[in-house]
Image: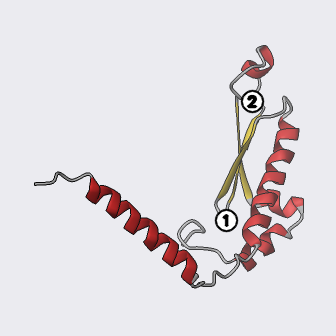
Amino acid sequence: MTASDRKLTPAEYARYARQTDDELYRACTVQVFRATGPGGQGVNTTDSAVRMTHGPTGVTVVARESRSQLRNRETCLKKIRAILERRSRVPKKRRKTKVPRHVNEKRLAAKRLRAERKESRRRIW
């Protein structure tokens, strides 16, 4: 069973987010490729864009901001860490709230008014 097959808990994401850069980097698969877009010869001849996939969580990020492959690798690590930290936060529990009576009455009054308006458009026999 891989990480993409099951849902990880916020605690598991937090554990990965606390890892050092070296540990995080070792758990990633790295692909380098030629970046597209403006940049001319610098972009067309070097494999400077980086795609990193964090194996345990399945998080994939791409960095092609810099001409330097090393800087793009560092950017990928920062992006992965940011995603892991965001996923490590426990979502707030939603509480049901009751619709206030005056809101309900206002809605029903608007419906009555619209019904009367439509009723007045009918043809009289």
Quarter of the image containing the N terminus?
bottom right
Front-lying residue, 30 or 14 = 14
Give the quadrant of residue 48: top right
Using a 10 Å C-alpha cutoff, classify the residue at mark 1 as few (fewer than 14 neighbours), some (14 to 19) or many (20 or more): many
Q: Residue furthest front?
A: 125
Considering only vertical position in the picture, is 75 above or below 44?
A: below
Q: Residue furthest left?
A: 125
Residue 99 visible within the image:
no
Quarter of the image containing the C terminus?
bottom left
Front-lying residue, 119 or 92 = 119
Tell me if 97 is positioned left or right of 123 in this view: right
Q: Residue at x 57, y 79 (%)?
A: 102
Front-lying residue, 97 or 62 = 97
Secondary structure at numbered mark 1? loop
Q: Residue at x 60, y 68 (%)?
A: 3
Using a 10 Å C-alpha cutoff, classify the residue at mark 2 as few (fewer than 14 neighbours), some (14 to 19) or many (20 or more): some
Give the quadrant of residue 116: bottom left
Give residue 5's position: percent from left, percent from top: 53, 69
Q: Which residue is mark 1?
A: 57
Give residue 71's position: percent from left, percent from top: 88, 39
Give residue 52's position: percent from left, percent from top: 72, 49
Considering only vertical position in the picture, is 22 above or below 98?
A: above
Give the mark nearest the N terminus, 2 or 1: 2
Q: Residue at x 34, y 57 (%)?
A: 117
Amino acid type of the residue tagged 1 in the rendering = Thr
Amino acid type of the residue tagged 2 in the rendering = Asp
Front-lying residue, 96 or 102 = 102
Q: Nearer the viewer, mark 2 or mark 1?
A: 1
Q: Which residue is mark 2?
A: 47
Give the quadrant of residue 73: top right
